[in-house]
Amino acid sequence: MQIRFLFAVFCVFLLVSCAEKKAQELTPWGEPLEKDSIETNDNFTLSDIQASGEIIMLTMSGPDTYFDYHGQGMGTQFLLCERFAQYIGVSLRVEMCKSQQEMLKKLRNGDADIIACQMPKNEKGVIACGYGVDSLKTSWVVNANSRQLADSLNSWYKPALLASIRHEEQMRFTMQSVHRHTYAPMLNAKTGTISKYDYLFMRYAPMARWDWRLLAAQCYQESCFDPKAYSWAGARGLMQIMPATAAQLGLPEEKIYEPEENIYAAVRYIIKLNTKFQDVRDPRERQLFVLGSYNGGFFHIRDAMALAKKHGRNQYRWDDVAEFVLKLSSPQYYNDPVVKYGYMRGSETAGYVSRIRDRWAQYRGVARGSKTPMDFMPGVTPGGDIPHAAKRKHRFKL
């Protein structure tokens, strides 16, 4: 009987010991983990972000948050966040969301590091930090466990930074952001000579089935016929070719300022854009869509076409689509479900196409009196379109 009692006591003691051991956290090698050594779950700490070399920013489309502008990220809050990324020595990756709820879900899941968009300061599970608007009680936010990142943002951000960024944006949107000499839009009206590069426009425009005078009008809009023109965004030369575009087209960087190479590359790019608008059956209309894409980006133009269709307009007629290019600067439209690429500075693109059309009409009116190589080409329409049957001297690969 005594033996059974002792055995029962031993079993109870063993069970209690096992329960306590199970409740106690252990190290990977089975030893008790000291309470003071338990690390809190801090998601990706500032040190982790710096070690990875990248910080992930969540935002929504808008003129103050983020938008694509000639292949460059723009928006006050994006540029601010980019400055912070530079401050901590990492690159910035932007992920676009459609709503605050989507951003919060991704942040809480650890899919991003910061919401660089004005959010309510009293939102649960996040820490308000960095750039905020006191009157609206909003701010950037990070995950509630990312205290180190929040402290770094708070110590870095100063109101003077905001003023500096806004001044920088304003400079980029003015003509001062394009460095170029302004030459006359017509070299000699009596002889129909538009510029000293007319022979290049005549040589390469037929490849795109364009009137050479349309290419000349676009060139003047881009650079005022200055072969050394360059912009803050990196565009170079007569046709303002971006370095990334030049690389795609096989144009070496050291040749980007050469007039013939620059014009030839621009025509190849025009041809690529033309193939993206084969659903626009009218060649004259297609030229306008290509011009709009050259300036504002193909995807933004497609968004405007989707809006035109939704609102019962002709998505294959530029004048109808241009109306929605303009409206893509309004939240009602750039937040529409059919819009995939968000806000754009539509007035700039609509104006770009309009000015080129007007100058092209002027060039054709002046130059029509003098015979040019285009006037003697068989099968050329008044708009400069060349049928497939027309012979070409140039062959190239895109």
Image: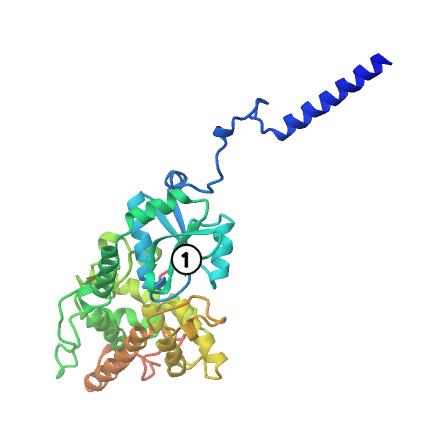
Q: Give amino acid for label 1.
A: Lys
Q: What residue is disc 1 on?
A: 121
Q: Is residue 181 visible?
A: yes
Please, is residue 251 above or below residue 273 in the view? above
Query: Which one is nearer the viewer's eye here, 359 or 11?
Result: 11
**Residue at coordinates 13% horizontally, 70% vertically from top-left?**
182
Question: Looking at the picture, how far across and down is residue 30, in whole percent?
Answer: 59, 23
Please, is residue 22 above or below residue 201 in the view? above
Q: How is the image coloured?
A: rainbow
Question: Looking at the picture, how far across and down is residue 110, in whole percent?
Answer: 49, 47
Q: Is residue 146 left or right of residue 369?
A: right
**Residue at coordinates 38% horizontally, 68% vertically from top-left?**
343
Q: Is residue 376 visible?
A: no
Q: Quadrant of residue 66?
A: bottom left
Q: Residue furthest right?
A: 1
Q: Quadrant of residue 245?
A: bottom left
Number of dots carrying numbers: 1
